[in-house]
């Protein structure tokens, strides 16, 4: 098994998501500890000391984000939980929402206490059905039990939570776009500075944290930062929920302790590549992270430093396994169609660039590519770097460049022979 | 939409005061849930009720892919065709549905029963391929299972 667990610590049953079961597991004990034994700044200090990094993709230290918000500055602060999980390949927050909604709510209450929040929000993607129903039911249970509202646990602390459902927009998973969406507008990202922690929702200091990042807060408070840091590696304390899909025998959500060997995870925990094939490539953390070849991936341990050294990142933990025999030209076509579809249209390099990339890859796949198309794709991808308001434009470019760099021969072949060397195959069958 | 106002007022109780603009998306979702799409009269009603500019509502309606200005079929079949689903058989499923129903993605059958759509990643990559029927996820779908599902609702 993939190391120590912090979140997936209980057997999933028909009732394990309910308040009664959560309390039986010691639930809302960390909230009580925070409210009755700790000052708000001590909570923030503990989360900062635990050095938990953001699990949404950017890996920004959560405590440092919180510390920017000044208590008693005479204005309201807001907390937004980012449950707009939409990075292709990622489905780990869904596990928390479906199976541990109270862990998230308890953690949000602790975070709200630490940063002086009276009104908090969960922004959940519009397509999520069961996760929304589970979370909504948990919110009602929590209100009835007095965990939300006025005088929580008999203290002066008061906090409300509202669930906000998206309506189909990838870019709303970006923190500032998420805020714009909660304000009732089309989900355009905003320029920084000011950062959202300075001026966010309704122009007030706002912390936006990913579901999994927040879910760790209750555990940090319950154990204390020192004990929490015993898990994982010195630079990446804790664990990550990894959602693994693609050509793998046992897809699903796994909790990996940072530092765990990736080849063991892939070949033992997840049962190896589908059909017993060789591992061609791994997209490590959602399609916006740079692809690794099979050999690169198998040599890594699962932690931020190792992946950064290999030129990629852990991203959102959405790992996609690609077997030998898969056509990378078609794979990039699917990715670029997605980016083109989801570009919000605010920044020219992304709005036009994604359309150009999509059209070029379509014609390469159709056997009408020109040798100069590869250089065109590089140039368009690089033109996005640092020229767009949000990270989507850059990330789409990086992901494209990584695939072109590592699988260039397949693209050259497709252009020269007017067909895919691998018959455009994306599926690999068990019996193959 | 006027009969939904009591429900919208309840939503306000857990929000900070004076942020009517934030109700745009929840109200539109609720209206569509009931009517199947958002009509001109709904926009008029929301402009009155929330006091937000009409253009804001129009922008929201055109920005978010789940919101509709026109009715669709009784059953909305949404096939994810992103990376992980395509790697696990979404493309043959989409072709099969298009052939079986005689419509291309984005179209509705002439009898108004089925609308076929392609959608991007729904967070069902580990249980791919996924077909969402109205709001319900049907995961690990095969063509046979899909046929049975459609026979069941046809």
Image (cartoon, rainbow, N blue to C red):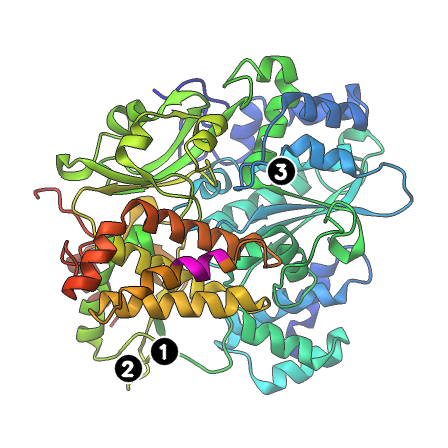
Does residue A305 lie above or below B5 as drawn?
above
Does residue A150 lie above or below A396 as drawn?
above
Determine whether the residue tagged by mark 1 lies in a helix, strand or loop.
loop
Of residues A221 and A103, which is closer to you in this image? A221
Name the chain letter of the residue that bears numbered label 1: B
Residue linked to disc 1: B73
Q: Quadrant of residue A334?
A: bottom left
Q: Residues within 10 Å of mark 2 (few under 14, many from 20)?
A: some
Does residue A310 lie above or below B104 as drawn?
above
Q: Are marks 2 and 1 in contact (CB under 8 Å)?
A: yes
Determine whether the residue tagged by mark 2 lies in a helix, strand or loop.
loop
Q: Measured from the top left, where is residue B137 in percent x and y?
A: 36, 55
Q: Are marks 3 and 2 on the same chain?
A: no
- The numbered mark at residue B109 is 2
Q: Are marks 1 and 3 on the same chain?
A: no
Residue farthest left in this picture: A431
Residue linked to disc 3: A105
- Part of the protein shown in magenta: A378-382
Position of A90 compared to A387: left or right? left
Q: Are marks 3 and 2 in contact (CB under 8 Å)?
A: no
- The CA span between labels 1 and 3 is 37 Å
* Residue under the image location 33 percent in, 82 percent down: B112
- The CA span between labels 3 and 2 is 43 Å
Q: Residues within 10 Å of mark 1 (few under 14, many from 20)?
A: some
Does residue A175 lie above or below A186 as drawn?
above
* Residue under the image location 80 percent in, 38 percent down: A116
Residue farthest right in this picture: A74
Q: Measured from the top left, where is residue A292 in percent x and y?
A: 34, 38
């Amino acid at each position: 098994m993939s190391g120590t667990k912090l979140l997936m610590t209980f057997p999933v049953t028909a009732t394990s998501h309910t308040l009664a079961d959560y309390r039986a597991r010691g639930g809302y004990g960390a909230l009580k500890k925070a409210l009755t034994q700790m000052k708000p700044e001590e909570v923030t200090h503990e989360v900062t000391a635990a050095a938990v990094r953001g699990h949404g993709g950017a890996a920004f230290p959560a405590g440092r984000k919180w510390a920017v918000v000044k208590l008693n500055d005479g204005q309201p602060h807001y907390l937004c939980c980012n449950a707009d999980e939409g990075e292709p390949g990622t489905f780990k927050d869904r596990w928390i929402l479906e199976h541990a909604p109270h862990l998230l709510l308890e953690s949000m209450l602790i975070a709200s206490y630490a940063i002086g929040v009276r009104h908090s929000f969960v922004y959940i993607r519009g397509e999520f059905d069961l996760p929304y129903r589970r979370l909504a039911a948990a919110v009602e249970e929590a209100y009835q039990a007095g965990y939300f509202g006025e005088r929580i646990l008999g203290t002066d602390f008061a906090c409300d939570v509202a669930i906000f459902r998206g309506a189909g927009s990838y870019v709303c998973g970006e923190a500032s776009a998420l805020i714009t969406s909660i304000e009732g507008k089309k989900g355009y990202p905003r320029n920084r500075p000011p950062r959202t922690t300075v001026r966010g929702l309704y122009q007030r200091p706002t912390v936006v944290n990913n579901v999994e990042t927040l879910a760790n807060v209750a555990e940090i408070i319950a154990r204390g930062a020192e004990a929490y840091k015993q898990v994982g590696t010195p630079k990446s304390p804790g664990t990550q929920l990894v959602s693994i899909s693609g050509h793998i025998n046992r897809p699903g959500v796994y909790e990996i302790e940072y530092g765990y060997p990736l080849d063991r995870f892939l070949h033992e925990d997840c049962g190896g590549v589908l059909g017993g094939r060789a591992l061609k490539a791994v997209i490590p953390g959602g399609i916006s992270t740079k692809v690794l070849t099979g050999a690169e991936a198998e040599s890594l341990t699962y932690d931020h430093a190792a992946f950064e050294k290999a030129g990629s990142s852990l991203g959102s933990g959405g790992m996609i396994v690609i077997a030998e025999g898969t056509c990378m030209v078609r794979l990039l076509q699917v990715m670029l169609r997605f980016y083109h579809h989801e570009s919000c249209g605010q920044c020219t390099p992304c709005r036009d660039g994604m359309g150009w990339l999509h059209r070029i890859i379509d014609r390469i796949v159709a056997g009408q590519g020109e040798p100069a198309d590869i250089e065109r794709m590089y140039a368009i991808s690089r033109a996005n770097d640092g020229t767009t308001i949000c990270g989507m434009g850059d990330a789409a470019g990086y992901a494209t460049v990584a695939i072109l760099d590592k699988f260039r021969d397949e693209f050259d072949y497709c252009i020269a022979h007017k067909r895919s060397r691998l018959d455009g195959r994306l599926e690999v069958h068990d019996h193959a | 939409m006027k009969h939904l106002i009591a429900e919208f007022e309840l939503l306000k109780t857990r929000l900070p005061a004076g942020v009517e603009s934030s109700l745009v998306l929840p109200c539109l979702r609720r209206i569509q849930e009931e009517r199947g799409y958002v009509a001109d009269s709904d926009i008029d009603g929301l402009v009155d009720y929330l006091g937000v500019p009409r253009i804001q509502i129009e922008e929201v309606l055109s920005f978010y892919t789940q919101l509709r200005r026109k009715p669709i079929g009784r059953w909305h079949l949404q096939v994810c065709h992103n990376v992980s689903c395509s790697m696990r058989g979404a493309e043959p499923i989409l072709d099969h549905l298009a052939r079986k129903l005689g419509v291309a993605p984005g179209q509705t059958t002439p009898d108004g029963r089925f609308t076929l759509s392609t959608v991007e990643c729904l967070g069902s990559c580990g249980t791919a391929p996924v077909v969402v029927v109205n709001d319900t996820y049907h995961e690990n779908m095969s063509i046979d299972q899909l046929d049975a599902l459609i026979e069941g609702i046809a």
